Amino acid sequence: MTPDTAPLRLGTRASLLARTQSGTVADALRAATGREVELVPITTDGDVLTGPLAQLGGTGVFVAALRDALLRGDCDLVVHSMKDLPTGAVEGLEIGAVPERAPVGDVLCSRDGLNLATLPRGAVVGSGSPRRVAQLLRRRPDLVVRGIRGNVDTRLRKVDEGEYDAIVLAEAGLVRIGRTDRIAERFGADGWPPSAGQGALAVEVRAGDAVGDDVARITDPDAEVTALLERAVLRRLEAGCAAPVGIAATLETRDEHGDDGGDAAGAGSRAVVRLVVEVYALDGAQSVRVERNVPKIEAQGAAGREDAAERVVAELLDRGAGELADLAGTGR
């Protein structure tokens, strides 16, 4: 069996969501390349340790073991939730593909189907994300927001058993494992910007590896341009999961006068990425929001994304974002 026909070994965490995401990527690779894909189970510290995520090392706690296995050659590629992937480069690794993106926003799942406005005063809402905590308290300062760990089904069970009145989750995860019936309310990405890269997957490979050409075939250009622009902003801020920052990039079409509408292929129209970045105080009492339209053609290149991120972060700092949250990048 030659290297280009041997089965691709895809490293995956054991959780239902991780296996589902990896299975989706495996199916896409089989369809695009005709090659078989084998799932290789890998245990991460985030799967076995307890405690608040930020205290365990942040989102990278789910990533390190997968990357180590990839670097050792135990597998040929790994799949990450883009929002969990630290923005710093790792020598020897690169993102080989960004597949089609799932819904990017957050959702509320409640025991009685209540939405955020109708939850009783003092209701207990679960979230381990400082961003979500700030967003919840910004809208409902009377809520009691408590940390929560565990996979999606574990968290939903804690709602059903009365430990929490509601929880906030990423819609993408519920879509991927078929739990959308539990959604009581969807939060729009414009008014409630999610984590950078939420809803997107990152398929990581060894830099220069021959499998990279096959993996690249499952990239969705629109998912790639939006998710990587969001990551560029996060990287410039040097903000991880412990920072209350929401970032949303949405593809839109503008006519030559800058209005919405028209066909992206039509005369006088242009594709832009509408970028919304909001930094919150941890208690949700204050926030700084920046909106910017970035030409799609600019956002498609790494240099253009970095330039746009630099401009957005400069505006955030000018408006006092560094006084609301601990953003390492604000010292630039």
Image: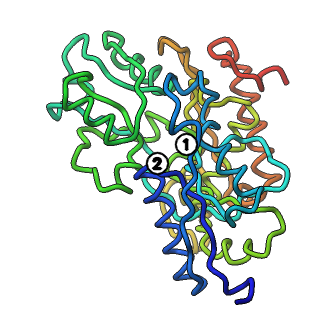
Residue positioned most to the left: 112
Q: Position of residue 37 (x, y in %)?
A: 56, 75
Would you place residue 102 above or below residue 107 in this image?
below
Label 2 neighbour load within 10 Å: few <14, some 14-19, many 20+: many
Residue at the spot 78% in from the left edge and 37% down from the top edge: 310
Give the residue displayed 40% in from the left and 26% down from the top.
148
For marks 1 and 2, give the one nearer the viewer: 2
Compared with 101, 122 (above or below) is above
Secondary structure beneath dot 2 equals loop
Which residue is labeled 1 in the image?
A: 248
- SS class of the residue under badge 1? strand
Q: Residue at x 50, y 55 (%)?
A: 260
User: Would you say 169 lies left or right of 82 here?
Assistant: left
Q: Quadrant of residue 189?
A: top left
| Label 1, residues with CA under 10 Å away: few <14, some 14-19, many ≥20 | many
Instruction: Give the CA separation, mark 1 to mark 2.
Output: 8 Å
Nearer-the-camera pick, 225 or 260: 225
When the figure is inspected, residue 36 is found, relative to residue 271, above or below; the finding is below
Q: Count the marks: how many?
A: 2
Type of the residue with mark 1: Ala
Name the side, left or right, on which 137 lies relative to 202. left
* Residue 116 place in picture, x, y as percent: 27, 27
For disc 2, the marked residue is: 104
Mark 2: amino acid: Val
